[in-house]
Image (cartoon, grey):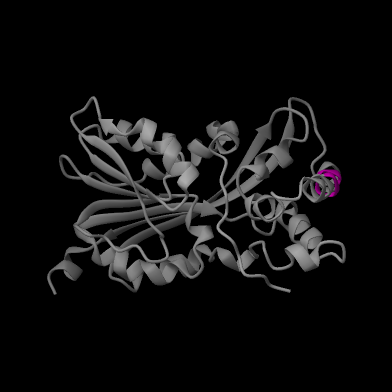
Amino acid sequence: MAHASQPTRWDPAQYERHSTHRRRALRDLLAQVPPLPAAPRVADLGCGPGRPSLPLVERWPDARVTGFDNSPEMLAEAAGHAGPTPGGGSLTFARADLAEWRPAEPFDLIVSNAALQWVPGHAERFPDWVAGLAPGGVLAFQLPGNLSAPSHVLMRELCASPRWRDRLGGITRGPDAVLSPAEYYDALTALDCAADVWETAYLQVLPGEDAVLDWVKGTGLRPVLTALENDPDARDAFLAEYRDALRAAYPPGRGGTLFPFRRVFAVARRTERRAAR
């Protein structure tokens, strides 16, 4: 059964525990962004705890970057990174719901790093976002394409099991939360964008005990942890069941636990033909 969702509570410190792997995909995305004008205006959708926005400042030192997020916990952490940047730009943060956000001014780059999977129907937002780009501006995003991986399948199955379904049934995301690369390509080119869409499977090696559980505690498991936060006994019981299932699916090996992770990337440039209409 599906439940009315409560706002997911995020833990910036837990999210950052695997920052090297999380940041790698962002850097791979930014490497494919075409040249931007001097002092570009950049929107970072789903900026998280602020540190993930720093590669934007590194790539475009004179940029004026605004990170948007709807998590009070993440924005509180991000505030520590706000201010002028050494290259003459700036980094600021603001609260926004990506399901409703519209650009208030033209942006040269709208970028999103592993956030859109949390926005149901996010492709329906593309027309507004592309319309908010300056001529020649770029919409670039990456998001996990691993919602059919054992880590998520086991989570969904456990939430739907007799013990947990009354409290957690329907609380997690299904595979349809992320479109296929071809569907993203079609959605973006329908908006007269020149689009480059691809996918990459990272063979991540995670250190430590119960490494995959530690990973999902920072991201995919947050709705479950939020739902059970006022019932520590139930939370611990759920985590014990889920931990055992993950241990069987992802046994530790030499050097760590192998955690294959597929990601979908898209870089779309607003064409001059659209701007001239």
Prevailing SS of the magenta stretch: helix
39 is within the stretch colored magenta: no
Q: x, y (%) of residue 77?
A: 45, 36
Residue 178 lies in quadrant:
bottom right
Residue occupying image coordinates x 41% and y 60%: 98
Q: Is residue 234 left or right of residue 185?
A: right
What quarter of the picture does the C terminus occupy? bottom left
Q: x, y (%) of residue 185?
A: 42, 66
What quarter of the picture does the N terminus occupy? bottom right
242 is within the stretch colored magenta: yes
Residue 252 lies in quadrant:
top right
Can residue 186 be seen here? The reply is no
Q: Is residue 222 left or right of residue 142?
A: right
Q: x, y (%) of residue 52?
A: 43, 37
Residue occupying image coordinates x 49% and y 36%: 23
The magenta stretch is 240-244
- In the displayed structure, 128 sits above or below 145; it is below
Residue 206 lies in quadrant:
top right
